[in-house]
Amino acid sequence: MKFRGINHLAMVTGDMDKTIRFWRDLIGMRLINGFGQKGFRHYFFEIDDKNTLAFFEWDGAACVERKDHGVPFKGPIVFDHIAFGVDSSEEAWQLKDKLEAAGFGCSDVIDHVFIHSIYSFDPNGIPIEFCYEIAGHDIRKKPVLNDDSPPFAATEGSEPQPGKWPEVTRPTPKEERFIAK
């Protein structure tokens, strides 16, 4: 099976106008789809030609509790932050300048050896990162495991390991496949 990126990340907003203004007008992602009805909306922004960022808006939604990127957190949590790749150092600096000019705090550029990153928050409190890859450090071609005490599963290598999950014994027959509306 070959995956084709992330079709969309589905986030939540309590204010679709602010969200559109941030992601479309400040960050520069095209608004490519939107639908809704009373008390509910779902809008999509184009990250690139295969990936999108989506937002649900419904009555009563509120900003998330602010949590800094990569800082340990106690209690329920779904994710730490969203990282968007950009093509160059110049684009990262342009985004940093735009975010700061618009009143959004932005970190210094951080060196993670294989990428350089800046960190900020969107108007919903969602932690975001913009990063660009460093030449000579392609972790997709040469995976790196730099952990003093990795979990056992990680020591088995970067490739999917067969036999770790039950095999499919009854595939869904074509005549039983349907698409719900």
Image (spheres, grey):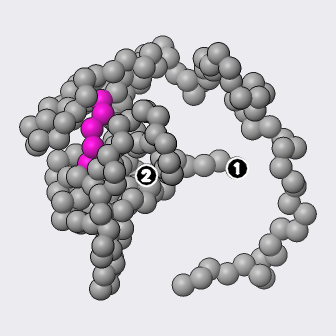
Principal secondary structure, stretch drawn in magenta: strand
Under tag 1, what secondary structure?
loop
**Secondary structure found at label 2:** loop
Count of picture labels: 2
Viewed as shown, does residue 99 lie left or right of 109?
Answer: left
User: Residue 85 got which mark?
Assistant: none
Q: Which residues are magenta?
A: 118-122
First in sequence, mark 1 or 2: give its number: 1
- Which percent across, then down, holds residue 83? 40, 39
| Residue 29, image x, y percentages | 27, 51
- Eyeballing the image, is 114 above or below 27? above
Q: Amino acid at mark 1?
A: Met
Q: At x 27% / y 66%, what residue is drawn?
A: 14
Instruction: Reply yes or no: does residue 121 show up in magenta.
Output: yes
Q: Residues within 10 Å of mark 2 (few under 14, many from 20)?
A: some
From what the image shows, is residue 170 above or below residue 113?
Answer: below
Tell me where residue 162 sits by quadrant.
Answer: top right
Query: Which three-letter amino acid code belongs to the residue tagged 2?
Result: Asn
Q: Residue at x 30, y 76 (%)?
A: 59
Near mark 1 (Cα within 10 A), the count class, few <14, some 14-19 or many ≥20, is: few
**Alpha carbons under labels 1 and 2: distance apart:** 18 Å
Q: Residue at x 22, y 33 (%)?
A: 106
Q: Position of residue 71 (x, y in %)?
A: 42, 33
Q: Which mark is residue 51?
A: 2
Q: Which residue is mark 1?
A: 1
Q: Is residue 158 above or below residue 103?
A: above
